[in-house]
Image (tube, coloured by chain):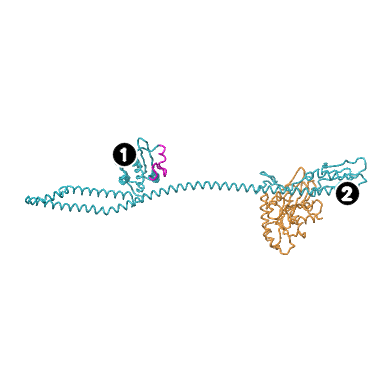
Chain colours: A orange, B cyan
Amino acid sequence: MIEFDEQKKRLVLKLVYYGPALSGKTTNLLCLHDLLTKEGRGDLMMLDTKDDRTIYFDLLPFFLKTPSGLKIKVKVYTVPGQVRHDATRKAVLQRADGVAFIADSQATEARNNSTSFDNLETNLSLVGLNIERIPLVVQYNKRDLDDIIDEANIRRVWDPTGIPVYLTSALKGWGVLESFADLARQTYHSIDKRYDLAGRHGLSSSEFVSRLTTRS
Amino acid sequence: MAKTPTHSNGKREDNLFFVVGDEKKLTELMTCQEVAPLLQGIIQAGACYAVIVDDNSIRLWDHGRPETNRATCQVSKGLFLEGEEVAAIMVQGVQDNTPLIQGLASLAQTTLQGLAQNNLKLMLTTELHTSVVNLSQEELLAVNAKLTASEARYRELAASLKKTVEQRSAALKKAHSRLLQQEKMMAVGQLAAGVAHEINNPLGFIASNLRTLAKYIDRYRQLISALQQATATLPAEGQEPLQALSKKLKIAFIDEDLQELLGQSEEGCHRIKKIVADLKGFSHIDDGETTATDINIELERTLNVLTAQIPEGCRVSKDFAPLPSLLCQPALLCQVFVNIITNALQARKQGLHLKLSTQKSHNTITIEISDNGPGIPPHLVNRVFEPFFTTREVGEGTGMGMAVAYDIITAMAGTIKIDSSEDRGTTVTIRLPLKV
């Protein structure tokens, strides 16, 4: 959940990149780190990895100030995708303000995707969040590969849910920024009513999104 | 599973909430011991003063002394944490050393940011570790609590199971011994009925033959009487051998005794017939079903069957009031009477007085069977109806008699009670409702 300190005029938002093992969550953050301007962005912090597999999490922080002087920090986390790190996933998922679900487009990964999505739903409810209400985008990553599930199939499954789906390649940089922008926009709208970001703090939705997605 | 947050603001009411990645202040990320050597180095390298201030211009750490006399140069560099400028390092030196001061400031900025970043990483890792361990512990505790609860449930179940099994076994044992008793009674009944049937046939022709024999003997006597009259007309020497023979053969005594023998035999036959009839009636081999029963008749029958067991010199008094017939299974009722009367007959060896009485009042039939025996000790009266309770020697009594009687009477919606005192003997009172 959002962290808001009225006195210090600080707002901390937490976005979590969730998904099955090796679906490209860390690559997404690396891509954002490479594409976006250094201004208002911290370094990508990768906690210990083993054989290039995330075992804790990665963290890419953003910082911006509204015209009113409200300091907003946006922390983008990844979770470890491997099944055995479920406790870590739960810990990271706590108080999340938005979730990007990174699915693996490879045809062989369909089962892992759905298992991981079920796991997301379960863990969200365990930490007191509702998948129906939390800002959520879905990425079908690795579109640059050959043996991948076709788009019609993806649309057939996901369109009825109303969850926006992006076809991406984090390795090539396709769609990564767009999906991040979508998540940022949804997150903005989910908190705007409560904190009146536009009215009291002079920060519009598009301003918020563009500050987070300014290319270098 | 670990507790879930209960509020949208993330506050937990019930338990700890393990948050990873809470906002950190710079002072939380760096210690004086880490910063001081760096600032000292800057001074040693030629700067006069080095200071770190936070975003509210509050001095966090410093070293050296601000130069006030000579012309100075100051270089300030921002310190960023997660993209946010949270503090600044300012290095001051004499103007001549400007390039050095600039170099030192850049160096300090890079080093301090690296330090903060690495420490943050370390803290996040530790936090996550702690969080995961705590979560796992909570989960384990929850699992443990569940297991403990289910174990307790199973224990409880097992305990009550043992109790239930014991109760059932006791009930089964009771039912089993009752069945045995009833079976024994049935076997006795069947045997009695069989014996009665077998005896009836020979008894029939014995009785019939006896009657024919009496007739035949009568004819012999007529003949003998005629012969005696004819002999009386003979001369004395002609009569003598005949009279001698008649005397030798004790014909006169035989003639007298014959009547008695025949009478006794007929009487014996009659008694056998009665006993057989009672045995048959008592065994109720033909009517195990419910029938209209006269309790007085059943009492008589029972008493007759038990004749052999009535000790010598025993006085039996009967006080039977006329009773309406009762719908019941007479065989069962006879069993009750046998069990009670047998007890009474064993109460004392000499001078026993057995009293049987029946009464009718309102809708109840009352049967009293009492003896003038030594009575039952007060502390045992309550145990008389317990199965297997007996004061007799092992093998003499099963201890089932009164228990069976109790069951049968209770099943007939009646009551059975025992009054006993040492001076008045024991009275068993059975009350049976006429309408069940």
Marked residue chain, label 1: B
In the picture shown, does residue A138 fall above or below B274? below
> How far across and down, in percent of the image, does residue B355 sit?
32, 40
Using the rendered view, name the quadrant where residue B14 is placed.
top right
Whichever of labels 1 and 2 marks the residue nearer the N terminus, that label is 2
SS at mark 2? helix
**Residue B7 as seen in the image, left or right of residue B287:** right
Q: Amino acid at mark 2?
A: Gly
Quick check: is B107 in the magenta stretch? no
Tag nearer the camera, 1 or 2? 1
B28 or B204: which is nearer to us?
Answer: B204
Which residue does the image show at 36% across and 51% down from the upper left? B187
Q: Residues within 10 Å of mark 1 (few under 14, many from 20)?
A: few
Q: In this figure, which residue is indicated by the disc labeled 2?
A: B103
Q: In this rendering, is residue A43 above or below B385?
A: below
- The residue indicated by pointer 1 is B350
Could you tell me the amino acid type at mark 1? Gln
Spot occupied by residue B408 in the image (x, y as percentages of width and height): 39, 46
Q: Quadrant of the C terminus of chain B?
A: top left
Which chain hosts label 2? Answer: B
Q: Which residues are magenta?
A: B378-395
Could you tell me which residue is drawn at 69 percent across and 48 percent down?
B133
In depth, the one of B150 and B398 nearer the eye is: B398
| Helix, strand or loop for disc 1 | loop
Secondary structure, magenta segment, majority class: loop
